[in-house]
Image: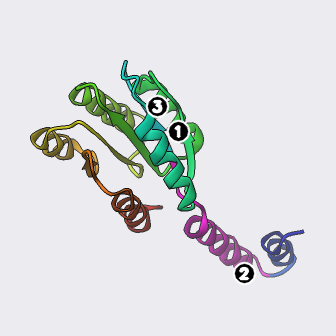
Amino acid sequence: MTGQLRLCWIARRCNPIYFLFVTSLSKTYQNTMRKIRIVMAKPGLDGHDRGIKILASAYRDSGMEVIYLGLRQTPEMIVSAALQEDADVIALSSLNNAHMTIFPKVLKLMKKNGIDDVLLTGGGIIPGKDMEALQDLGSGKLFGPGTPVQDTIDYIENWVKENRR
């Protein structure tokens, strides 16, 4: 029996208020101590996946739980996976100039499914004015070529620390 289960078992035999306190404390502990879960994907017909695979390895090495969906994912598949995996972050890579179609569609599906506590971020060959437009629509920070990997890790970790429920 783990420590948390033992405490809950003991608490059930004691005061019900104490049980509620221990249960809520346990949920808070799990929320703050759980690894960051990130769903990564290459939407559309873009077949260049070396960069996202490097990022996936870096995120895993930094302690995140990475779910890499692979190439040619639709926005519906991406949002469905984020729901099923209880993701904290959705990260997309766009190198084929479809970012102004894909990102808004993913955001729309996230809102439709009530996913308002998940960060949508990404990167690729995205012009600055498009990055600003996508951020105005509700996406998180987007990263261009040459961005140090640690900058993306720091951004994700800080966002999750401030926004995880």
Residue range (magenta): 15-38
- Determine if the magenta segment contains residue 29: yes
Q: Is residue 130 left or right of residue 12?
A: left
* N-terminal-most mark, 2 or 3: 2
For marks 2 and 1, give the CA distance.
32 Å
Give the x, y percent position of residue 59: 50, 54
What residue lies at 12% left-to-right and 44% top-to-bottom?
128
Which quadrant holds residue 9? bottom right
Name the residue carrying label 1.
Answer: 83
**Residue position marked by numbered label 2 in the rendering:** 18
Q: Main secondary structure of the magenta part?
A: helix
Q: In the picture shown, does residue 71 fall above or below 35?
A: above
Q: Tell me which corner region of the image, top left, top right, bottom left or bottom right, holds residue 90.
A: top left
Q: Nearer the viewer, residue 14 or 85?
A: 85
C-alpha span from label 2 to label 3: 41 Å
Q: Residue furthest left?
A: 129
> Residue 113 magenta-drawn?
no
Residue 145 coordinates in the image, percent (x, y): 26, 45
Query: Given the image, on which type of amino acid does mark 1 rest?
Result: Leu
Badge 2 marks a residue whose secondary structure is helix
Q: Quadrant of the N terminus?
A: bottom right
| Residue occupying image coordinates x 84% and y 70% | 2
**What residue sits right under mark 3 in the picture?**
78
For mark 1, give the secondary structure: helix
Residue with the most extreme right position: 1
How far apart marks 3 and 1 lie (CA) works out to 9 Å
